[in-house]
Structures are given as C-alpha cells and as structure tokens.
C-alpha cells in the first residue's frame, strides 16, 4: 500500500499556505481518519508493505506531523480552559501523537517506510 503524504494524508496546502485554520474538532477528525486508515492497511498488508512517499525534503513527514500534533495540543489546552475541563474523552487523545508513534517508534521490527517519491521511484525502476 502506497500513500502520498502531501495533500493526501497530510493537509499540506491548507497548513503551509494558511488557507484554513482547522478547528480542534476538524483536526481530531482528520487525525483519527489518518490513524485508522494506516492501521487498517498495516493490518491488511503488514507494516513492511505500507509506504508513505513525499516530495518534501528529509524529515518533512516527521516535522509536519510534529507541528500539527503541537497545534492540536495547543487548541486542546485552549478548549479545556474554556470548558473547564469538560470535553469528550476521545478528543483529549491527540491522534497525531498516536500517528507519530505508529510511524517513528523503533519498537517495531518492520516500520512503516517513509521515503521521498524520487527514492521510491528509483527503488521500483533501478535502471
């Protein structure tokens, strides 16, 4: 299973061009869908057969995921202050932190492969 990171899994254009300020609920929904989709493909295909490709530079996937996880945490903190800690338990879990663990934790013998689109192409077409 091959996933493109930019504007397929991750809302690159909207985030980088400041086209849309996502609400906490929108971020949560998007993060949960990303996480569930990748988990489902890991279950169906095995971790070693799930690839994420990007045209971004080295570290782009990790950095963009870290950035959106921070944004989620910030918006969650603001919402908790406004509601005096009364929020749905599900929304208190940062789905982007879960995604970060899924993609980058070293506990797995077969990690999900994150690579540049160019490197992926060269791997498929070595000559």
Image: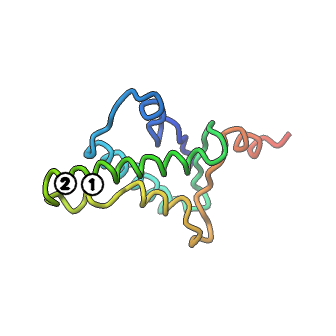
Q: Which mark is residue 57?
A: none
Query: Could you say where residue 37 lies in the image, as x and y percent from the top left?
Result: 42, 52
Q: Nearer the viewer, residue 93 or 50?
A: 93
Farthest residue, direction right: 127
Q: Is residue 60 left or right of residue 85?
A: right
Mark 1, residue position: 77
Circle 2 SS class: helix
Query: Could you say where residue 36 lies in the image, as x and y percent from the top left?
Result: 39, 55
Q: Residue at x 25, y 45 (%)?
A: 25
Mark 2, residue position: 81
Query: Could you say where residue 64 lies in the image, as x and y percent from the top left?
Result: 51, 45
Q: Quadrant of residue 35?
A: bottom left
- Badge 1 local density, few (<14 within 10 Å), some, or many (20+)? few
In the image, residue 42 sits, relative to residue 71, either above or below, namely below
Circle 1 SS class: helix
Q: Residue at x 27, y 54 (%)?
A: 77
Q: Nearer the viewer, residue 97 or 48?
A: 97
């Amino acid at each position: 299973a091959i996933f493109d990171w930019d504007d397929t899994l991750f809302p690159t254009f909207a985030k980088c061009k400041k086209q849309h300020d996502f609400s906490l609920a929108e971020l949560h929904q998007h993060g949960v869908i990303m996480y569930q989709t990748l988990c489902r493909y890991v279950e169906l295909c095995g971790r070693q057969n799930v690839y994420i490709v990007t045209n971004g530079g080295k570290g782009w996937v990790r950095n963009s995921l870290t950035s959106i996880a921070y944004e989620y945490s910030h918006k969650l903190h603001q919402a908790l202050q406004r509601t005096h800690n009364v929020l749905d338990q599900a929304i208190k879990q940062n789905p982007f932190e879960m995604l970060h663990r899924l993609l980058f934790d070293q506990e797995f013998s077969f990690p999900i492969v994150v690579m540049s689109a160019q490197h992926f192409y060269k791997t498929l077409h070595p000559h």
